[in-house]
Image (cartoon, rainbow, N blue to C red):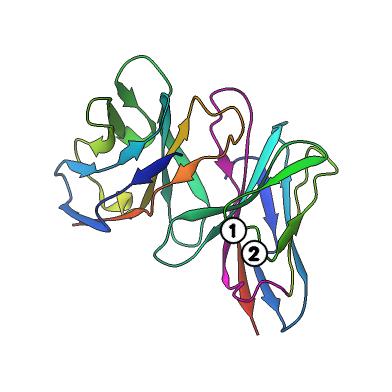
Amino acid sequence: DGGITQSPKYLFRKEGQNVTLSCEQNLNHDAMYWYRQDPGQGLRLIYYSQIVNDFQKGDIAEGYSVSREKKESFPLTVTSAQKNPTAFYLCASSSGIQETQYFGPGTRLLVL
Amino acid sequence: AQSVAQPEDQVNVAEGNPLTVKCTYSVSGNPYLFWYVQYPNRGLQFLLKYITGDNLVKGSYGFEAEFNKSQTSFHLKKPSALVSDSALYFCAVRDSASTGRRALTFGSGTRLQVQP
């Protein structure tokens, strides 16, 4: 899983609650990404950031928010507007023109 | 727009036999192509990539992939499968012509089951 850490490993969300997933990298990568993985499906892009203080919506951004105040950190908030948040969330980072993405170990979000 | 297809949900192979996991892609420019492997409840591990050059790319754990531009394919191969290769495999693509979105597009994944 390289130099990318995600916490917590498991997260439980109550109805109407916002929760934040942490992603930190020590690879000095410029770009960071958040993906959602549902059973039997591939990865879907939620948000990505190519540089500090800048980020773009991916394919399924509704109900999620992010910030990129530091190069090393890219936290994801799952808001109460996300009606079906149960999934495995993966953070990744990349750098350079060939842009191999390296992934963290993931956070599994469950709804109580 | 860029897209990638993995036509097989699952591939079964006996240990010691060669394995192939299929991937086809669609991009408007030249493709950057990647293979990743995922073990249960873990993140994705990078196996190999094609950017340019030799069509046969060698990667980690004895895996290789062949880029075929005319067939828009990038199939993953291994000469002799191991039980420990059993996992979920993802193909991903990025269009080199894209100057905006630099994110990869992933296929739906192929589960490889290697029987002892």
- Disc number for residue A36: none
On the image, which quarter does residue A35 sit in?
A: bottom right
- Image quadrant for the C terminus of chain A? bottom right
Look at 17% across and 52% down and name the residue there: B13
Look at 50% across and 62% down and name the residue there: B41
Q: Earlier in the sequence, mark 1 or mark 2?
A: 2
Amino acid carrying label 2: it is: Lys
- Does the segment drawn in magenta span residue A88? yes
| Subunit bearing disc 2 | A
Horizontal and vertical percent position of residue B68: 25, 26
- Examine the rendered structure and indicate whether residue B73 appears above or below residue B113: above
Q: Which residue is mark 2?
A: A9
Q: Which residue is mark 1?
A: A60
- Which residues fall within the magenta stretch? A81-106
Dot 1: element: loop
Marks 1 and 2, how far apart at CA: 22 Å
- Does the segment drawn in magenta span residue A35? no
- Image quadrant for the N terminus of chain A? top right
For discs 1 and 2, the disc positioned in front in the rendered view: 1
Look at 37% across and 43% down and name the residue there: B4
| Subunit bearing disc 1 | A
* Left or right position of A28 against B100: right
Look at 16% across and 44% down and name the residue there: B16
Horizontal and vertical percent position of residue B51: 43, 22
Q: Residues within 10 Å of mark 2 (few under 14, many from 20)?
A: some
Horizontal and vertical percent position of residue A32: 67, 41
Q: Residues within 10 Å of mark 1 (few under 14, many from 20)?
A: few
On the image, which quarter does residue B103 sit in?
A: top right
